[in-house]
Amino acid sequence: MEREVIMTCQRCHGLMVYDRVFDLEAEFLELPIWRCVNCGESLDPILLRNRQSQDQHSKTLTAEVA
Ligand SMILES: [Zn+2]
């Protein structure tokens, strides 16, 4: 299985690390995301998939935990 996947930020092309957040609105599901260590941009693989079919709904689902 490929666990070491290198992602680069689409905004600043910096290194993105794999992180996890908890979406309280989704019954405490643990959501895997990519987060840029350079600019802090978060990238949700699930949102990327949803964006293909629901572009209007994608931006409102961004979950961030301070
Ligand atoms: Zn970045």
Image: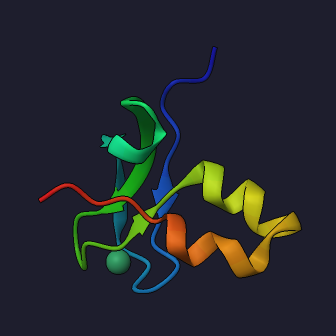
Q: Residue furthest top?
A: 1
What's the colour scheme?
rainbow
- Residue 24 location (% of width, % of height): 33, 42
Judge whether 29 appears above or below 10 on screen.
Answer: above
Q: Quadrant of ligand 1?
A: bottom left
Tell me the residue at 31%/43% (across/down): 21
Tell me the residue at 41%/46% (across/down): 25
Tell me the residue at 80%/69% (across/down): 54
On the picture, is 3 further left or further right than 25?
A: right
- Residue 35 location (% of width, % of height): 34, 59
On the picture, is 1 further left or further right than 42?
A: right
Tell me the residue at 44%/78% (across/down): 13
Q: In the depicted view, which residue is nearer to us: 66 or 33? A: 66
Judge whether 31 appears above or below 50 on screen.
Answer: above
Q: In the depicted view, which residue is nearer to us: 6 or 48? A: 48
Quadrant for the N terminus, please: top right
- Residue 44 location (% of width, % of height): 52, 56
